[in-house]
Image (cartoon, helix red, strand yellow):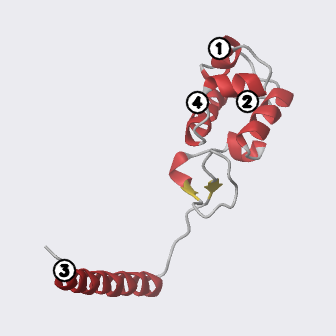
Amino acid sequence: MEKSQDEKLKAGQKIKKIRELRNYTQDYMAKKLNLSLNGYGKIEREETEISLNRLQEIADVLQVKIFDLLGFDENKLFFNQNSHDNSTGANIVLQQPQAITDGERKQYESRITDLQKEIDYLRGMLEKTLPK
């Protein structure tokens, strides 16, 4: 099934957004893909068709699955800060939003309230012990 013009237009924007989230430059991407900077820029500006093979190469450089690249939605992601990887790129994890029950929401709100009280208490203790 052929993609609509809208889907083709969105691919370059998705690639650009994920590249920026990874803190990769266009120059870095161009070098990894053996492209000129201008050639890579055309991909992000959607001025050229992207073959499936090239799309897979881009996904590999961005360290995402091709499905996640094409289905990228910045409203459905979070960052994994506990990565043991020393790479400079952020560890991007796509997550589908899940509804929580009222009971779960109340538990979260209660825990947040408890933590805020603990923070306030600890701040008060620090203020008493630290010189002014």
Q: Nearer the viewer, mark 1 or mark 3?
A: 3
Pick whichever, 18 or 124, lies toward us.
Answer: 124
Query: In terms of image quadrants, where is residue 41?
Result: top right
The residue that label 1 is drawn on is 47
**Three-letter residue code for mark 2:** Lys
N-terminal label among 1 and 3:
1
N-terminal label among 4 and 1:
4
The residue that label 4 is drawn on is 13
Percent of width and height locating residue 22: 61, 42
- Left or right relative to 48: residue 81: left
Q: Secondary structure at mark 2?
A: loop
**Three-letter residue code for mark 3:** Glu
Q: Residue furthest left?
A: 132
Q: Secondary structure at mark 4?
A: helix
Marks 4/1 in contact by CB < 8 Å: the verdict is no
Residue at x 39% of width, y 85% of height: 111
The residue that label 3 is drawn on is 127
Percent of width and height locating residue 103: 44, 87
Q: Is residue 5 visible?
A: no
